[in-house]
Image (cartoon, coloured by chain):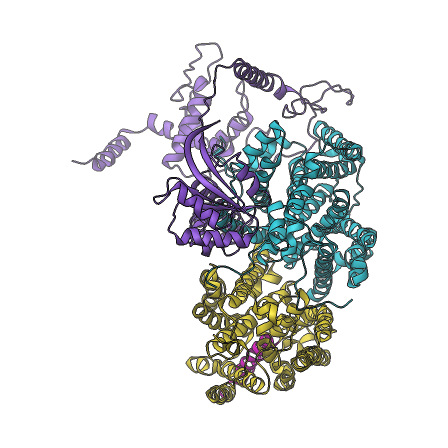
Amino acid sequence: MSHHDLVYQKKNLPESLKRLGSILVVVGLVLGVAGFIFDAQRALFDYLLAYVFIMSIAVGSLFLIALEYLAGADWSTPIRRIPEFLSSLIPILFILVIPLLLNLRSIFEWSHPDVTSHDKILSGKSPYLNTTFFIIRTLVTVGIWSLFYFLFIGNSRKQDISKDQLLTKKNNKLSAAFMPIFAITITISAIDWMMSLEPHWFSTIFGIYFFAGSFVAALAAITLATVLLKEKGHLHPRMNNEHLFSLGALQFTFINFWAYIAFSQFMLIWYANLPEETFWFIGRWGGYWSYISLGLIFIHFLVPYAVLLTQPAKMDPKRLKFISIWILFAHVLDLYWLIMPQVHSAKAGALTILFEFGFIIAALGGIILVFYFNAKKQNLVPVGDPKLEKGLNFRL
Amino acid sequence: MNIDYSQELPVIEGRITLADIDRLIAKPLDEKPDRKFFIALSITLTLLLIGAISVTYLFFNGTGVWGLNQPVGWAFDITNFVFWVGIGHAGTLISAVLYLLRQKWRTGIARFAEAMTIFAVMCAGIFPIIHTGRPWLAGYLTPYPNQHGLWVNFTSPLVWDVFAVSTYFTVSLVFWYVGLIPDFGVLRDRTASKLKKVIYSVFSLGWRNSHRNWQHYEKAYMLLAGFATPLVLSVHTIVSFDFAVSIIPGWHTTIFPPYFVAGAIFSGFAMVVTVLIFVRKVFDLQEIITLNHLEKMNKIILVTGSMVGYAYGMEFFIAWYSGNPFEQFVFINRAFGPYAWAYWIMVSCNVIIPQLFWFKKIRRTIPAMLVIVIFVNVGMWFERFVITVTSLHRDFLPSSWGYFIPTIVDIGTLIGSFGLFFTLVLLFTKTLPVVAMSEIKAVAEGAQPSHHGGDH
Amino acid sequence: MSTNKLFGITALFNTPDELVHAAAKVNELGYKNYDVHTPYPLHGMDSVMKLKPSKLGYITLSFGLSGAAFALLFMYWAMSLDYPMIIGGKPFFALPAFVPITFEVTVLFATLATVIGMLAFYFKFPSNSHPLHDTPYMKAVSGDKYGVCIEADDKIFDSEKVKALFNELHAKEISEVFYPAIEVANIFEPKFITLLVLIGLLTSGATYVTLNKLIYMTPFDWMMNQNKVNAQSKSLFYADGFGMRKPVDGTVARNFIPYEYKGLAAPVVPLSNPLTPTNEVLNLGKKRFLTFCSPCHGNFGDGDSRLRGQFPNPPSLHSEKVRGWLDGNIYHVIVNGQNVMPSYSSQLSRDERWAVIHYIRALQKAKNASPLEILEAKKETSSNVAP
């Protein structure tokens, strides 16, 4: 093996990826728009689902970047470009959120002043849950994320050329500042976009619940991209399966964390049995919802738990590929379970299921396209990062 | 100061040989305790005696000697219990979670932190046992086939507590002991005293430093760490269930499990830092328990302290957001009612003061960090006090509102638990190696084969 | 003390690199019964020695799963089958509430099995009599040296060849280790006997004191002695000196309905029997009648007291007068008493009184039936009898 083989050389991603992304976007949008014509309200909720899905992947990735800097981790340095590319979805959220902001009245009960004025609890909440403040909060949170995104990524890209260690230090400091802001913004997003769909319901753990699900989904997306890119030789040639271990282990940890948070929330509400809290779960138990609620335990916890339990499993590329796709699906299901029971639409039937996932398909296509265009312009390995060498030497 | 990010930080400071490590760590065990040790021990034993007297007085007279009243039927007992269980979380966290995260710096502090876990859980265990005033009745909490034909109520959070705390204590003890086995081997081979040799031989079980054993040993250690991690979370989660499964406003809130866990880590690390500051100085272990270690722990204190702050904020916000007048009242009453003093002690010690750890200079200055971690210890005790007492003292029925004032027996028992804790810590430093010798040796410079042998 | 039987030959090295090299060589030459000894685990040694991955995880997994199954099944049995009780409105099998204990038991089983499995099954511990113990070699490898030991029972072991190999590897120290002589402890040693006697005395003494003295002392005496006023004790607090207090005037006991015609000659409004004379009611009536009424009224209500003159005999219940009474009148007599008959209201509950009345009616019917009625009754009963 010559020395030359062990140096990273940039390779372009195949054109077929772009084609796949475009097809998914087109097909998804066609289905979504058809769904909109069929049942506008339900389609808006489908769109909200897709929006939250993109948001969770993007912000979860940004969180992983900050976590790497903050913890001084080096195992993730060789693959840091992947979360960086995924978090470039954040500024796009500004555009994606517009259809939602224009249709708040079709989504949120609290946006109807005539309803809130007759409801003592809702009128009590109106200082927080009102259209103006909601739009301000949305724009500010996405704005803050974008700001951090540009700062982190800007420093990281500059380092490719300058190899300046000071940039790492800057990002370290940024990440420390990011963490508390992240905690607040993701909680606000979770409360605004999901919890307030049922404005009478409340749960203090809800922000953490959403964070747990998003981060594990972001990890799944990152792992999937890492394994695929590594197989096709787009990453650093010195990477081996042991580098995958931490990704597997983190997924395993946060699958458990999600289950822990989900169980805590359910358990406390079930045990105390207060009607003002239980109705939310009861609404997710009627009809076919009980299957989805129970299915979440298996799909979002037991199956990934069993698949990732052993140490060899956590670095087996085949298994990781499978479980990453599985977890992404589980995350969609989780969001579906959070959002869709709040749809009160008269129209239902076989046709709805046809259109239901149009926007999610488009979202997947969009993520692939964004990734493709990012990868076209930049190195897939942060070649100037001082921690890269340590990261490549990482062994269990 | 500029750090070179391409280099790994050494775990041990200075060039210290393997033989030096053994000598340094075994030194307190080889020497006879000095005057200072006996002075310290007599202080802690006095505190313990105060506790023993208080508890004996309690057993003779019943729980009426405490300041409990209607509606505050739970005060110091549960506060102290949760406080000590919380302290007991840092040890397992350091030894298990940091092990799984492959944080090598844990080696210097893991043994000590684990010991503190065990002692803290012992202190915690006292309170549920004495809180009925009839400790021998605690046996009824175990499910055994009895003449009443009854089983314990497996759906009761208090029974969960029994299972959680006893499992946690057992597993921590086993984990600690497994870590000690190779060190007993070292001590056995070092000691000149005949009696000590017999004791160390018995406890080492015949450890032979064989690699065929090390292989299973490392696997077992990893498996134990893998189990101890969710266990440590489960214990404080179950402690939080004691409160949160009820319907009392201020207790029943879904964020309690992760909030309690974060608080436990927070208080546990604060206590570990408090004790380690003295230990590294007294036993001359500055090279093994370095300033870097303390700084990292201070960072964790900052992170977990902020998590606790997040939970305080969330509770307040959702209390308002819920639109439930009882919830709203409890939180307003907490911050501005008769117990406002306790609430603001809690907030300033737990959320505001640890923010000083944002400054690197403070994170690395011993006196400053000592002051801060002591504040954190105080604040975390008050957190449990605030949760317990302020939620109870003004319940749904204004006619039964009351105010809890601790009696001298309450305070004596609390003092006694500190006495027990520090007595055990002192005895530990003189009887067992306070740092894991074999683990420290494994991370010393040049301790590992230079090329990563085999088929990599 | 050691025998002449060779256990193995050991070699010491100063650095881990030398040891890795030596172990690789020993393994390459085909030795099977050898071991390396290091003060801490060396990374990569597993692959140098070609050790198979540890199977300890399987013990952990199987015991963890059995712990979970055991806990769940046990709680299911105890809470749903053996002593089902509704607690907090939850179902008998309240799965979410069983999760915490199931988890704890799983962890307990798994960790204990892992450690005990490792120590007892893999290491065969405790074993303080291994030949390597107490050798200078062991002292060195538990400090800062790295050693390899080839055991004599290896198939290709040859003392000279092994020594040559170690020399070739530049070992710092090579030594032979022999099996130790087996020591036999003398159990009849006076010291040991004394110890046993002392332990025996201590245990029996402590047991005696606990069972005969301690559990009768405060605070272990189950609150036998309390500073409170008992019903039968003298009280200095109350003016009349009694510890026992009467209920406040007008106190009505729970479930007690006062009889409104008490003290009157007869009920003002006729009362009717609320019970249907079913088998159960008549049986109850019979039972109570035989217990409370028959001593004076006789077993069949004839007024033939079983008390043989110790108490004035009452009139027969089969008189025209009593047969003509309304049920309410009999009830009134039971509650109020009549002539020398006291009130039976504290012996018989309301339902029991009415049941007794049914039974009296049955007795009256039986004693005073007309021939026609007897014939009809016989017909009815005979038609019920299978031919």
Question: What segment is highlighted magenta in the picture?
Answer: A38-58
Nearer to us in this view, C285 or C230: C230
Left or right, B357 with reference to A88 = right
Image point 55% across, 68% down: which residue?
A: A216
Image point 67% across, 58% down: which residue?
A: B10
Please give the letter of the chain rendered in yellow.
Answer: A
Nearer to us in this view, B33 or C44: C44
Chain C: colour as depicted: purple
Nearer to us in this view, A2 or B409: A2
Q: Main secondary structure of the magenta part?
A: helix
Residue C171 sits above or below residue A186 on the image: above
Looking at the image, can residue C72 be seen? no
Task: Say if the magenta span includes residue A48.
Answer: yes
Please give the letter of the chain rendered in cyan.
Answer: B
Nearer to us in this view, A299 or A345: A299
Residue C135 image offset from top left, x and y in percent: 52, 35
Q: How many marks?
A: 0
Looking at the image, can residue C10 be seen? yes
Left or right, B359 with reference to C155 = right
Residue B90 image offset from top left, x and y in percent: 66, 50
Residue C323 sits above or below residue B155 on the image: above
Residue C281 sits above or below residue C63 on the image: above
Task: Say if the magenta span includes residue B224.
Answer: no
Q: Specify the farthest residue to the top.
A: C309
Residue A120 image offset from top left, x and y in percent: 70, 69
